[in-house]
Amino acid sequence: MRSLYSVLSPLLLLIIFGFYPSMTIGPKEGWQVYSSAQDADGRCICTVVAPEQNLCSRDAKSRQLRQLLEKVQNMSQSIEVLNLRTQRDFQYVMKMENQMKGLRTKFRQIEEDRKTIMARNFKELKDKMDELQPLIPVLEQYKTDAKLISQFKEEIRNLSAVLTTIQEELGAYDYDQLYQRVISLDSRLRNCMNKLTCGKLMKITGPVTIKTSGTRFGAWMTDPLASQRNNRVWYMDTYTNSKVVREYKSMEDFISGLESRTYYLPFKWAGTNHVVYNGSLYYNKEQSNIIVKYSFETGRVLAQRALEYAGFHNVYPYTWGGFSDIDLMADELGLWAVYATNQNAGNIVISQLEPQTLEVLQTWNTEYSKRNAGESFMICGTLYITNSHLTGAKVYYSYNTKTSTYEYMDIPFHNQYFHISMLDYNARERALYAWNNGHQVIFNVTLFHVIKTEDDS
């Protein structure tokens, strides 16, 4: 009998010839291997010729070979089963690989999202540092606290370097810990600023956008005479036909919209130039030149008084209109009213008011047209006037009530949202609060100060 058996692996050949190393098969009495090769999958292929029929039936070696052949066939079947299992396992591994690739993609997306969140957090910190940075050149002008100022400058430089590094390698530092360091430095700087007396406006930086809410026109404010623990915010949307004042316990509550109380005034207001001073709201009664003092504590009107000859109801408004004829404001020296009269040819008049009775204590007449003013604010008894409420606005004119003199200036500031309808100075915060086209923003001011000393009277 002659047969052809192919596809024997090297393992099977080793088994056949390894079990019988002394066996020698002649060309006519045994099996003959003519050639060997590999198929496309890398498996060995051997051509084997069996011995003649008469030898298979008589020779003892032929019986042994038949037995080996049966074993080889059994092993071949086992290998085939193993091959099928291997194929199935390979498909499972391929499926797992695809799943792992999907997980890698998801993890990569999570990592990118985390970096985005961290970048936003650190940008807020960087903005906070930008607010603090302008204070340094002011403090450096004074030699009395040179050591303390040097220490502050070094800390700010270190924090700025850390923030720059963090922006390049997000996640390298703990955000909460760094934020507390910034807050601590801010508090120490403010304590140092309390030593400073009134100063002259030198620079306006910012703004920092606190919130976006309300209509295009409105007012928001804090009380400059409140204690450091009292950080209430008051919010008055629109410039006419409203009596609603909303109160928030803190700046954080204001940002999140967590309102603590709502007040309904006895009279509607005109314009956006209100002020909260020592726990009371001072505002212009609609369609009149009457100033109203309203107590938040009692919910009652404590005083009313008409500003003699003051124009109202868009007779002498700021450039944007909005019944902004009478502007009430406060600074380090007290409560003020800014308006215009026919007697002063429509030019700005400044009056200092007695906070309890609203009596006019003293008045100054300027030569700056009220209708040509964009907005104005008082700092240390000096009125600063902007030349526009639109893009490109700058502080253009100032009037010093201590010396009764005026000065033309050129202090630009960034009108980020293109239309300002309220701009007021807060002496406690040393900042300008603004309503910028439906955005509530804060500008930082740089003042030229003189430090109080123990020798000063």
Image: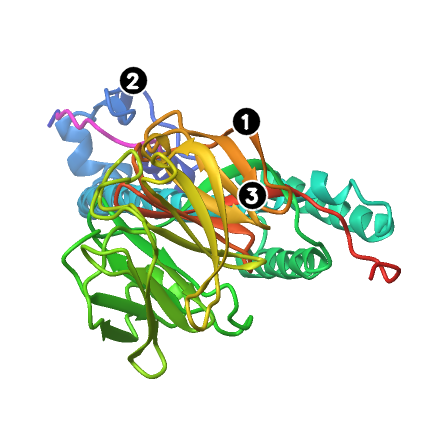
Relative to 228, residue 455 above or below: above
In what element is the residue under mark 1? strand
Q: CA distance from mark 2 to mark 3?
A: 89 Å
Q: Is residue 410 left or right of residue 13?
A: right
Please provide percent x and percent y for residue 207: 44, 41
Kindly identify the residue that appears in the image at 29 percent across and 35 percent down. 419
Q: Is residue 105 left or right of residue 57?
A: right
Give the main secondary structure, helix, strand or loop, of the magenta stretch.
loop
Instruction: Determine contact: label 2, label 3, CB under 8 Å.
Output: no
Judging by the rendered image, the residue that carries numbered circle 3 is 445
Please provide percent x and percent y for residue 427: 55, 56
Q: Is residue 407 left or right of residue 193?
A: left
| Type of the residue with mark 1 | Tyr
Quadrant, the N terminus:
top left
Residue 408 is marked as 1
* Magenta residues (range): 3-10
Quarter location, residue 51? top left
Quarter location, residue 135? top right
